[in-house]
Each structure stands twice: as structure tokens, then as C-alpha cells.
Image (cartoon, helix red, strand yellow):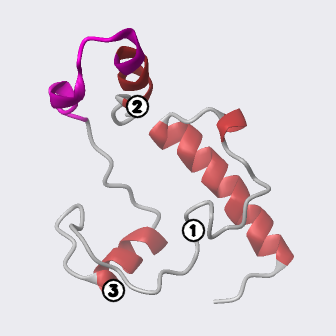
Amino acid sequence: MTADIHQEAELRHWLVDYRVTNIGSAPEEIDLDLSLNDLGVGSPKGVGGRFPAKICGSEALWQFVCEGRSAIGQISPDRWQPFDDGSSVVAAVLARINRGARS
């Protein structure tokens, strides 16, 4: 799919809104001068790994994405415990990344 300028602007707007609403990113954390590929929405050349929400395969994953659905859930409270060495540096990093899903 080749996006025109109007579609790209809409996609960038959607990406900011999605990340702020669902992931908890601050708008100023998102560098909109990056290419769409660097922002994480480029065309995949291949897909591998674990799929969320009972998705079986890349076609189902693509359909899930096109429908604007989300499989982001709560992070288990003990998810990062093995990485916590008790230092203030690690505590600051964990406080930033352990946001969980938004309702």
C-alpha cells in the first residue's frame, strides 16, 4: 500500500493518539520527524513470534490491526521483579515502563 501525504498525516495523528491513549506515552516523547517505518508502522517484510488475542498467523494479525483492535493488557505486578536490584536507577526505569494497559 502506498500512502499519499494526506493519509500519512492521518496515520501519524492516529499513532500519537493511540500511543497516548493506550500505551501511556507522552505526546512530546513521539518524534514525528521519524519515518513511519522508524515509528513502527512500516510494512513488515515478515512476521514471527507470539501473537496476541488468539491470533493464528500473519493474515489474522493484519486483520486485527486493520480493525484497530488492541491486545494490550495489564502487566503482572511481578513481571519485572527479576530485574529489580533495589537501586534507584532501576526503580526509576521500572516506574516508567511498568504502566500496564489503559481502560
Q: Secondary structure at mark 3?
A: helix
Whether residue 13 is situated above or below residue 76 in the rendered picture:
below
Q: Is residue 85 magenta?
A: yes
Q: Is residue 74 left or right of residue 20?
A: left
Identify which amino acid the numbered label 3 is placed on.
Answer: Glu
User: Which mark's residue is nearer the viewer, 1 or 2?
Assistant: 2
User: Which mark's residue is nearer the viewer, 2 or 3?
Assistant: 2
Which stretch is magenta? 75-90
Q: Is residue 94 left or right of residue 79?
A: right
Q: Mark 1, residues whose alpha carbon is within 10 Å: few (<14), some, or many (≥20)?
A: few
> How much space separates mark 2 and mark 3, taking CA atoms?
30 Å
Front one among 95 and 91: 91
Q: Main secondary structure of the magenta part?
A: loop
The image position of residue 12, as x and y in percent, is 71, 59
Residue 59 is tagged as: 3
Whether residue 4 is situated above or below residue 91 in the rendered picture:
below
Identify which amino acid the numbered label 2 is placed on.
Answer: Ile
Identify which amino acid the numbered label 1 is placed on.
Answer: Val
> How much space separates mark 1 and mark 2, taking CA atoms?
21 Å
Q: Which residue is mark 2?
A: 97
* Residue depicted at 83% across the width and 72% down the height: 6
